[in-house]
Amino acid sequence: MDYHPVIDSSEPLTSRAERFIATNCVRCEAVSLEQYRDQLLEMGISATHIDRAVDFQRRWGGLVLPPSLEYEGGPKMLLAEIPVDALERAGWFDAGAERVSMAYGFMIGPTGEFGIDGTRWVPLHASVEGWIESVALAHHASNRAAQITTIKGDAIDGLALHDFEPVTEVRGLADTWWRGPDSLVAIYTGEAECFGAQKFRVARVYTGLD
């Protein structure tokens, strides 16, 4: 394994995420998809689709993040792979294998979204950079909060977020972060939307932060 940061993104990362990658992540060697371009083109995969997967692999392929608190830890390693049903789902490609056996996989959507694909496709963040920012922020908050409270299901509706502002760097879609004066709130709804079950919603409230 090569221990070095990977700061080569189409979207700028915060200094927090850059430090997180440099100090908590490793990058393993990942095969370039470019060598399979002709074979993929012969299969009918568009050049644009291939270009996106190749670019993802160049930027993020082989990056191993610490496990996230949700989604059974997230991808074991960020790794682009064009699925066998790519002709039917133009633009999607796999973002990396799961750490454990699960009912869904991790994918990059046709406009760059990072999400889960199971009973239905649910984009969690508008980009893989958003996913990385979210994992980095959870790591930061977990290490600095005086108290962490987990809320599940319908109880999340009782959260009072009128004095909070969205944390825009996570590029949240199904999953969002909110920042208050001395607290952070993370709300995860991806699994709830994927399986149509609101009981799977999870929120974590980090209080006592600077």
Image (cartoon, grey):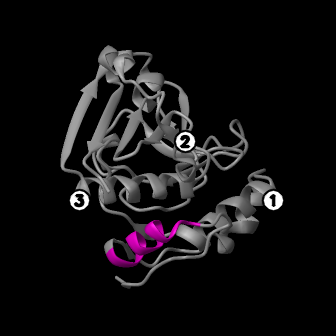
Give, as a three-letter code, the residue at label 1. Answer: Ala
Q: Of the residues tagged 3 and 1, which is closer to the observer?
A: 3
Give, as a three-letter code, the residue at label 3. Answer: Asn
- Give left or right: position of 198 versus 124: left
Would you say residue 21 sits in the magenta stretch?
yes
Give, as a three-letter code, the residue at label 2. Answer: Gly
Q: Quadrant of the C terminus?
A: bottom left
Going from N to C along the chain, the mark reached first, 3 or 2, is 3
Q: Is residue 81 above or below residue 175?
A: below
What range is drawn magenta here? 13-23
Q: Is residue 110 above or below residue 52?
A: above
| Residue marked by disc 1 | 47
Q: Residue 27: image x %, image y %?
A: 41, 76
Relative depth, front residue between 5 and 157: 157
Relative depth, front residue between 41 and 130: 130
Helix or strand or loop: what does disc 2 sit on?
A: loop
Q: Give the number of marks.
A: 3
| Residue marked by disc 3 | 143
Helix or strand or loop: what does disc 3 sit on?
A: helix
Would you say residue 86 sits in the magenta stretch?
no
Q: Is residue 102 above or below residue 126?
A: above
Spatial separation of the CA atoms under disc 3 and disc 2: 22 Å
| Residue marked by disc 2 | 172
Residue drawn at the location 30% of the way across and 17% of the way down: 155
- Give left or right: position of 207 versus 77: left
